Image: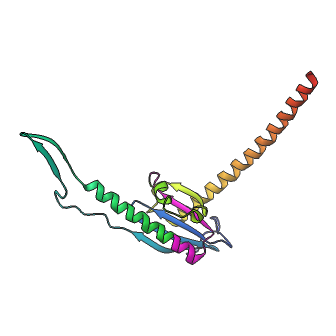
Amino acid sequence: MKISKKLPQFNNKKVLLIISGQLISDFYMVHNGIIKKIKKVQRKQPRYSDREGHFLVRGRGRLYGSGSVYEAKKNVTREKFKKDLARATINTVNKEKIDEIYFFAPKHLLPYFQEELPLRIKKLIKFDFRGNYTNKHPFKLLKKIKKRKLATKNKKGLLIKNLDRFKEVKKLLKRKKVGSK
C-alpha cells in the first residue's frame, strides 16, 4: 500500500512496525513509501471448562479456602506468546535486513515483550508506543511516529538553546568571581 506524502516515507531504510496486543501481533514493513503487512503472530486464548482446576480446602466441618488455577494457564500462554513474538521478530529482522523498529504495545506488556529480545535487536528499536493499537490503521501509526519524531527534534532544539544559555550564565558567573577578588 502506498503511503501518503504527508507521512514518513522511510526512503533508503527498511523499518519494521510491530503492533502487539496480549496474544496477537502484526508486523508491517515500511520501505521507500510503501507499507505492507508481512507477518502475524497469534496464540489462542486458553479455554476453561466450568470448574477446571478448582479446589477447596476443608477441615473439621469448615471451609478454609478455595481457588483456581486459571491464572497459571494464562501466564503459560503469555510466556509462549512472548517467545513466539521474539522468535518472529528475530527472523524478520534477519530475513528483511531491518534498519529500525517501532514497537506498539500496551503499557504493562511492552517491557515484558522486549525482555526476550537480544541486545542487537533492542538497539534497533527507535521508539516504543504504549497503548492498544491492534485495530488501528497503519497510517494512524505512521502519524504517531511523525509526531514523536517532531517532538524529539523540538526537545533537542530546546536542549541546545538551554545549554547555550547555561554556558553564557556560567561565563558571567566566572567573570563576577574573578572581578570580585
Q: Which residues are magenta?
A: 90-108
Quadrant where the N terminus is found in the figure: bottom right
Q: Is residue 64 above or below residue 26?
A: above
Q: Using the rendered view, name the quadrant where residue 70 is placed.
A: bottom left
**Side (left or right) of 2 relative to 179:** left
Q: Is residue 178 left or right of residue 111?
A: right
Q: Position of residue 136 (x, y in %)?
A: 47, 62
Q: Is residue 122 visible?
A: yes
Residue 170 on the magenta segment: no
Q: Residue furthest bottom?
A: 95
Percent across and percent down for residue 92 are: 53, 74
The residue sitting at the top extreme is: 180
Measured as percent of width and height from the top left, residue 109 is found at 44, 55
Residue shown at the point (81%, 42%) measured from the top left: 164
For the question of whether residue 136 can be seen, the reply is: no
Residue at the image point whose x is 32% and y is 67% from the top: 44
User: In this rendering, is residue 13 above or below 73?
Assistant: below
Its colouring scheme is rainbow
Residue at 64% from the left image edge and 65% from the top image edge: 8
Q: Is 5 or 8 nearer to us in this picture?
A: 8
Examine the rendered structure and indicate whether residue 171 appears above or below residue 78.
above
Residue at image position (34%, 57%) is 75
Instruction: Pick out the residue farthest to the front.
Output: 60
In which quadrant of the rendered view does residue 50 lie? bottom left
Q: What quarter of the picture does the C terminus occupy?
A: top right
- Of residue 53 and residue 146, the one placed in the foreground of this image is 53
Residue 97 is a magenta residue:
yes
**Among the 4 quarters of the image, the one containing residue 77:** bottom left
Describe residue 112's horizontal placement relative to residue 171 as left or right.
left
